[in-house]
Amino acid sequence: MKYVDEFRDAALARGIAAAIAREAATGRTYHLMEFCGGHTHAVSRYGIPDLLPDTVRMIHGPGCPVCVLPVGRIDDAIAIARQPGVILCTYGDVLRVPGSGRVSLLKAKAEGADVRMVLSTMDALRIAEDNPDRDVVFLAIGFETTTPPTAVAVHAAKAKGLRNFSVFCNHVLTPAAIRGIMDSPEVREMGTLPLDGIVGPAHVSVVIGSRPYGFVAETYRKPVVIAGFEPLDVLQAILMLIRQANEGRAAVENQFTRAVTPDGNQKAQRLVADTFDVRPSFEWRGLGSLPDSGLRLKEAFAAFDAERRFAMPGRAVPDHKGCECGDILRGVKKPSDCRLFGTVCTPENPMGSCMVSAEGGCAAHYTYGRFRDHR
Amino acid sequence: MKYVDEFRDAALARGIAAAIAREAATGRTYHLMEFCGGHTHAVSRYGIPDLLPDTVRMIHGPGCPVCVLPVGRIDDAIAIARQPGVILCTYGDVLRVPGSGRVSLLKAKAEGADVRMVLSTMDALRIAEDNPDRDVVFLAIGFETTTPPTAVAVHAAKAKGLRNFSVFCNHVLTPAAIRGIMDSPEVREMGTLPLDGIVGPAHVSVVIGSRPYGFVAETYRKPVVIAGFEPLDVLQAILMLIRQANEGRAAVENQFTRAVTPDGNQKAQRLVADTFDVRPSFEWRGLGSLPDSGLRLKEAFAAFDAERRFAMPGRAVPDHKGCECGDILRGVKKPSDCRLFGTVCTPENPMGSCMVSAEGGCAAHYTYGRFRDHR
Amino acid sequence: MTDRRLFTRKLDLARGAVDMSHGSGGKAMAQLVRELFAAAFANPLLDQGNDQAAFDPPAGRMVVTTDGFVVSPLFFPGGDIGSLAVHGTVNDVAMAGAVPLYLTAGFILEEGFPLADLKRLVDSMAQAAREAGVSIVTGDTKVVERGKGDGVFITTTGIGVVPPGVAPSGERARPGDAILVSGTMGDHGVAIMSTRENLSFETDIRSDSAALHGLVAGMVGAVPDVHVLRDPTRGGLATTLNEIAHQSGVGMLLREAAIPLKAEVAAACELLGLDPLYVANEGKLIAICAAEDADRLLAAMRSHPLGAEAAVIGAVVEDSHRFVQMETRFGGKRIVDWLSGEQLPRIC
Amino acid sequence: MTDRRLFTRKLDLARGAVDMSHGSGGKAMAQLVRELFAAAFANPLLDQGNDQAAFDPPAGRMVVTTDGFVVSPLFFPGGDIGSLAVHGTVNDVAMAGAVPLYLTAGFILEEGFPLADLKRLVDSMAQAAREAGVSIVTGDTKVVERGKGDGVFITTTGIGVVPPGVAPSGERARPGDAILVSGTMGDHGVAIMSTRENLSFETDIRSDSAALHGLVAGMVGAVPDVHVLRDPTRGGLATTLNEIAHQSGVGMLLREAAIPLKAEVAAACELLGLDPLYVANEGKLIAICAAEDADRLLAAMRSHPLGAEAAVIGAVVEDSHRFVQMETRFGGKRIVDWLSGEQLPRIC
Amino acid sequence: MCLAVPARVIELLEDDRATVSLGGVKVACSLALVEGVTVGDYVIVHVGYALSRLDPEEAERTLVLLAETGTVPPASDAA
Amino acid sequence: MCLAVPARVIELLEDDRATVSLGGVKVACSLALVEGVTVGDYVIVHVGYALSRLDPEEAERTLVLLAETGTVPPASDAA
Ligand code: SF4
Ligand code: SF4
Ligand SMILES: [Mg+2]
Ligand SMILES: [Mg+2]
Ligand SMILES: [Mg+2]
Ligand SMILES: [Mg+2]
Ligand SMILES: [Mg+2]
Ligand SMILES: [Mg+2]
Ligand SMILES: [Mg+2]
Ligand SMILES: [Mg+2]
Ligand SMILES: [Mg+2]
Ligand SMILES: [Mg+2]
């Protein structure tokens, strides 16, 4: 696979790892947050921690849209799916997330709701066209990467005059989440939580460009390196962050130049701006309510807005009291610090947001890395 | 089973059989037609021919409503059943009757049509009530016995204001069929076909009474004995017919006095008269078109008439050229005289009306009596 | 070929479709098996045409048999699909005169099926196996999407050993042989029908579902040379006797009056217009033996609780047409033919 | 009990419902089998926890195994449900080191299924059996109403004999043992996925569906004391290794670079976000043997066409946590855990 | 098709319906086509409807007649 | 969730769609979000949509950089 295999080369990895070890040998420690679930996945699946010196510690950030989807929104989706005549379509990742009472969309399906996995918004549209007497609802979730395809579908539905298609919109915004973390007391008051740099989003940045992260460097004085999702990309970004830290710089750098430009995909950005409004605030599981962090359909697309078309509970549902996700997401704690980790809370029975999807910090550690807790 | 077992008593059967043998020992032969499929069934299933002298020969008449339903009407029913949203309900006997191209309602069901067996018109009504968004069509077939329950259902549907219920009416009239046989040249010209008496309908007569058969005795000078469907009933009726024949009488006698009166069930008759009109003519499979022999819903019930609500082919479909049913029904030939019997034509693959249901003459002979052809 | 006589026209393998009759145990199924499966799989063991294949393993004579269970409803008076899946297969082993040893069980579960119901029928299955003295030694579970199954389907396979000198088989019926049944006919089918929504009637009839190998052990102890053993399940007594007549190339003559029948079963059949001889049994067997062995076999059967109502119901006769005939209770004669089409849906 | 470690919470037998994960070959299924079926059926043979039960019959050592096949679509590149139903069960027999002798087959057909398709898959089944040298010696057919099935389900049972001195079993993996696979991983699952309407992608990948007993015969000839043989079907290599690790009470350490993988399979998995170690195989096996036997076993495997790409992929290690770990191609280490939930629907 | 059975009314139900019994088997049936049926009556039941009452006296009379006909010693045969 | 792969455009289809290939596996994807893509281009494909072109020169540059960084002989280790 061109542009994939090259970035997984073990020999190069050893070389970069050696460079990191060399350059990180400064007597200090480096706490680096990979914002994205994609990075978390790469770090865990390729065993990157084994290539890093002990002084470099990776913090698994909140960049997994499935994880941060509040339980109450899952409940809402299930309530929609259970309404007679509805076909609820969504991406596979969402199906297993348990809502209240451990009921997931998959369980609702087993109980008779018509819930279908799609790989693309185009599939959902096709299902709507093929089932004119059914109400097809697309449960839209994801960051800026996944939002433009939803926008395309809404415009296509309008163009086709589809009356049985709507979108339950749960798209969220990356910079707002980063700001939320930066504004948390633990990060702001440097003593409590050292955060020495951020591995910035890969595919989100393909769409929005590198510019939107400027505030992290400018306002919060933290280095950011936008990195691809291949393991060599991550390793190189780590090295770049260590160099910035060593040099006392705080800039937005771009490791993923093969796909990310400063301005991103402006066609996609325009389409998103034409389709969605920013919500005044939106709840992120594990992080709480964040201002200007979520999208909803514009008034012009009200006919396609499932939130306006369907009654749903709309209740907020708290996570398990013992869940430490909030602290884990900010790097204050590690998954293994949570008393529930691996016993009460596992990927089969997630108690908190970080265990919900394979890209969540707790789940990735459980699935790929928990052996390290025992050696 | 009271009023059942008594009428199947083997010792009494031997006694009546002996009486028949005695009284039929006149040197002549007796050709007796049992009109009803119910009698045909009893004759075959209990092995009555073995109890009769060779001089008494039973002719299996056309009294099986399933058998006489024209192939074209089955095609129509299948066409209705295949229309989207339709649930077609009917009695189990009809499901296996092949229409054109050997497609039966059962096959249509296997291919995806929603065809349901019911035991009563009440079940069909309930299905209509339970499926308000579906079109429930009751394929109504049967003689005067089965017609009143259809009438009850139509009135109930009207009273309940059901808009998704209709009846595809194929009810036919017994006396018209008897008249059709009597008017056929073979019977009229006494030389061709001897017909010495008729075992008259059991349950049809429960409804219409014994009076409607008067014309057989008066106009056609044939003895009629209305008989129950138990084997002793049939045996006794045979004896009564032989006695009439021996005495040169032609009267309508009633063996089934425990259930049949001269006037029948007048409540049922009134209900039928209020619900249906007599069609000018109707096609009987095996007998051809017979005047005043079928019913259709009155104008007042047009909303419940599937013939007015659904498009259907309405084509007449001839039977296999080699089929001898017409002659068999009039007693001119026996099933085993047909070249197709038991080879090309079997209950699994009926070619003509008499092989269609277990109560048809050819089917009954095949299923219960064909061993006699080989001894 | 005798098939030309049995099946009027060849199965339309190009344009035909499966319909319910192909699974009803009647002629259509026999044809499907003959023209499709048997033709494709042809081998000496399968060609014997029994419900089980008897084979000589590395050492000792064993039998293996398999049956799928798709009964609806899953729970019925006198049993459930779990106990039925044990009894049905134990009985097919026993019908070789064998002692059943092991069962395997394959489950196909429909998404959304309640675990509580599953547990209930699995417990029932376990109990039936315990009572029958057989072990369920391996199994498999599949789940299909909602709407692609019907709650639970179970396929069981049974393995057993045949005592030396015992070799009942469907082709061993000989003119002069006596035909016996172990008890009343049609109980299972009527019990199932009584629970079906669109037929519902009230009766005390319970399924006769039971494991018959204990009864068989006594029978082959008394008459090792029993010629045929078979359980009249789908298609009932009538169809099973026709299968045997066809396999052995003989006719049969039954006496209706001798066939054990519960009054309520007769009444239920009367009500539905069914013939009890075509109604399924799940705890009864047919035995055919030399006339001189009949009394001994009958006595052995009657001495076992599951054979208390056993009876000699007729005899094998020479008949090139392989007709199963019956002297009716009424005094006449009739054919008792193969089931044609389906009598009623899904009873095992 | 080790179950407490494997399963976080007990199966909710009162209020829970079957879902797709119960049939996916992963942990949920292991739990269902453990807590429901195994608990109810408990007997020494079932308790061994292998895919097949090895038992001592009247004479000689034999194995019997059963598997249901519900794959969708019924026809896929490289095979169909018919050939799969033969290969799958032959392989479960072979995984006991056994020579498969007989198969039984139970069909559950959906009303309306085209006979032509049925013939096609039955022919394919017959051919697969012929090629494998096994006979399908008995069978059963049921038909369910339209909408109560999914075309065709097949349950096959296999019986085989084990050569003396051969006794592979899932609990025999010992620290120090070598872990081998017979070829590339994930071909079957990817071939199935490529045909699914909502995933459809184009690839030349064909299912690896094949009967492995010939390969196994060579292997046990070379190394009679092979400790474990198992075919990584549903749940793939990862889940199967975890099963074995759990059964044997050991850990494992794999080398990702040593695991054979077709480039196209890797690409398809990349595209779908799947891990090929969890993708099903139907013509591959895992073998575990003493380190000193590994070369001989590998040579025996490579000398057979179905083992041409065989490789040693890792070693058994002592580990009270029973972790299956892997040194990634990239140089780090990770756990290769049980499949959690379902990876993708109905692949066997 | 004209199959009908004589069954005993054992309970009157609402909606002009009744439970009837045939040889111990109980089913519901409609009384919409008959009048004045009471518990203990025998009715002829067809496709779920009572078509008429069965007249026990006439049944008795028929049986007597059958018995007389059937048991008249057939002089020639009985010898 | 943000899974995306670099794939080569091998055919342009109607409706602003294309067939792309990843390691020999071909899928259809939408070009609605990109402009001027032609056969031979590499695109980043996410949930069935091309999100952008991949810049081969930048990829090359990154690889060179990686190689340089990774192969600078680490004096202390190489000894
Ligand atoms: S292990 Fe579970 S409960 Fe604990 S922090 Fe992680 S997600 Fe929350
Ligand atoms: S055997 Fe068939 S073709 Fe011949 S007369 Fe009878 S129904 Fe007609
Ligand atoms: Mg069997
Ligand atoms: Mg059986
Ligand atoms: Mg059997
Ligand atoms: Mg299995
Ligand atoms: Mg269902
Ligand atoms: Mg198996
Ligand atoms: Mg298997
Ligand atoms: Mg296996
Ligand atoms: Mg069977
Ligand atoms: Mg289906």
Image: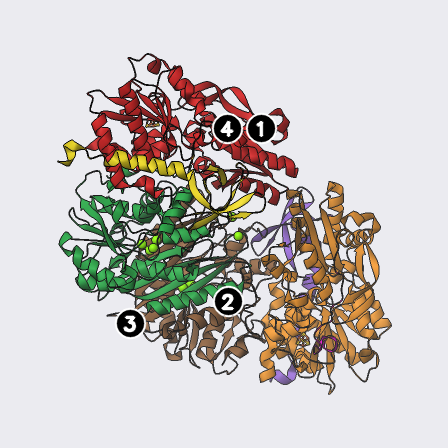
Chain colours: A red, B orange, C brown, D green, E purple, F yellow
Q: Chain of mark 2?
A: C
Looking at the picture, how far across and down is residue E7, in whole percent? Answer: 63, 55
Contact, mark 4 vs mark 1 (Cβ under 8 Å): no
Q: Which mark is residue C56?
A: 3
Q: Are marks 2 and 1 on the same chain?
A: no
Ligand 11 within 8 Å of disc 2? The answer is no
Question: What amino acid is at disc 1?
Answer: Thr
Q: Which residue is mark 4?
A: A170
Circle nearer the viewer, 3 or 1: 1
Looking at the image, residue E17 sits to the left or right of residue A27; the answer is: right
Q: Chain of mark 4?
A: A
Q: Can I make out residue C112 in this image?
A: yes
Looking at the image, residue B365 sits to the left or right of residue A77; the answer is: right
Q: Which residue is mark 2?
A: C29
Question: Could you say which is closer to the camera, residue B334 or residue D297?
Answer: D297
- Displayed-image quarter of ligand 2: bottom right
Question: Could you say which is closer to the camera, residue F41 or residue D215?
Answer: F41
Does residue B318 show up magenta in the picture?
Answer: yes
Q: Which residue is mark 1?
A: A275
Q: How far apart are labels 2 and 1 at the CA level?
A: 60 Å
Circle nearer the viewer, 2 or 1: 1
Q: Earlier in the sequence, mark 4 or mark 1?
A: 4
Q: Can I make out residue E72 in this image?
A: no
